[in-house]
Image: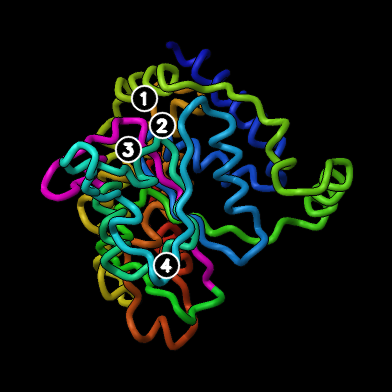
């Protein structure tokens, strides 16, 4: 696969996902970057902003197995990973695989599950291996998670710890669309049959596992020069020195930004990265990897505000 073919594939995915999800072009691009950079995405936004539909549309645009977990406070790790059940017919234990044994997984309202269940999924995300009763079951390189959470309703939720949030490449904030986009959504739905299934019915599969692997191999060949690496490191180290931030981003966070930048450069048709790539990705890649100090919290500032200040303060390479 060359850059032109890769770009054409990405454009086809955007077009197909866009048939179901309108007015979220930047979010679609970020999910594409995470997919090819071997990362996972956390989507945060109020109910009714197409978070679940976005994941379903991506699954429909890819010839990959799709699974969904609706997280609830009584969900147990075995409900996610699977369990060994005794088969009286064969007098032996038989593995009943859980929903993580798929290729594209939608973890809906992940913050509603208790910490033990969250940890079970997040370990699988990090290692792409499910461990059940001491036996490891590889899930494959295509395993990709899109998790959603609702920031409004906090009753009965278990916020993800910072160390577990680090498993996500991006935290994407989904907001209500602009008025024109919202009107177009209503027009589209008014012309479709009633029911949720109609939303993704027009989406064609344009990506399979082989094409995904070829795209990732292409990205593996993209190298970042010292100037770009130095800029990424300067931004990450600035989070550790900012008075508004209690805990700054780690070296693994800097590595995650670099991985995303390589994928973004390829999606833009380049075999090299530019400072604009870093500036575009550093906020979604780091906003969930920093912890604000008490002063910022009292003043109502957010992680995005803190990262924006750092971006404005750290000089970009020419």
Q: Which numbered dot is residue 111?
A: 4
Q: For label 1, count other residues whose C-alpha is less than 10 Å away and answer few (under 14), some (14-19) or many (20+).
A: some
Residue occupying the point 81% across, 57% down: 179
The residue carrying mark 1 is 216
- The residue pinned by badge 3 equals 259
Mark pair 1, 2: CA separation: 5 Å
The foreground one among 138 and 314 is: 138
Above or below, 260 against 167 in this view is: above
| Residue 199 horizontal/vertical position (percent) | 72, 42
Say whether disc 3 or disc 4 marks the residue closer to the N-terminus: 4
Tag 4 secondary structure: helix
Label 3 element class = helix
Q: Is label 3 in contact with label 2 (beta carbons under 8 Å)?
A: no
Name the residue located 32 percent from the left edge and 63 percent from the top edge.
76
- Residue 298 in view of the camera: yes
Q: First in sequence: mark 1 or mark 4?
A: 4
Q: CA distance from mark 1 to mark 4?
A: 30 Å
Q: At 82% from the left edge and 48% from the top edge, which residue is drawn?
A: 194
């Amino acid at each position: 696969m060359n850059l032109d073919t890769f770009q054409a594939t990405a454009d086809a995915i955007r077009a197909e996902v866009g048939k179901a999800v309108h007015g979220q072009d930047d979010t679609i691009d970020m999910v594409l970057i995470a997919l090819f950079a071997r990362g996972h995405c956390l989507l945060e936004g109020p109910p009714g902003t197409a978070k679940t539909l976005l994941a379903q549309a991506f699954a429909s645009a890819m010839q990959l197995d799709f699974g969904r977990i609706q997280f609830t406070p009584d969900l147990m790790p075995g409900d996610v990973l699977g369990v060994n059940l005794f088969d009286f017919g064969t007098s032996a234990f038989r593995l009943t695989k859980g929903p993580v044994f798929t290729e594209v997984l939608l973890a809906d309202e992940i913050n509603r599950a208790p910490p033990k269940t969250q940890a079970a999924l997040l370990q699988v995300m990090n290692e792409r291996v499910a461990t059940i009763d001491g036996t490891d079951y590889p899930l494959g390189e295509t395993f990709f998670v899109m998790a959603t959470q609702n920031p409004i309703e906090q009753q009965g939720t278990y916020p993800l710890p910072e160390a577990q949030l680090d498993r996500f490449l991006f935290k994407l904030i989904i907001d209500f669309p602009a008025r024109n986009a919202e009107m177009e959504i209503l027009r589209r739905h008014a012309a479709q049959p009633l029911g949720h299934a109609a939303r993704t019915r027009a989406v064609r599969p344009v990506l399979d596992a082989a094409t995904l692997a070829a795209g990732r191999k292409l990205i593996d060949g993209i190298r970042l020069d010292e100037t770009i690496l130095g800029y990424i490191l300067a931004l990450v180290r600035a989070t550790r020195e900012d008075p508004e931030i209690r805990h700054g981003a780690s070296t693994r966070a800097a590595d995650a930004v670099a991985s995303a930048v390589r994928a973004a450069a390829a999606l833009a048709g380049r075999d090299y990265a530019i400072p604009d790539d870093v500036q575009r990705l550093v906020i979604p890649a780091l906003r969930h990897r920093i912890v604000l100090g008490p002063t910022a919290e009292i003043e109502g500032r957010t992680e995005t505000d803190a990262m924006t200040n750092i971006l404005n303060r750290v000089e970009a390479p020419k």
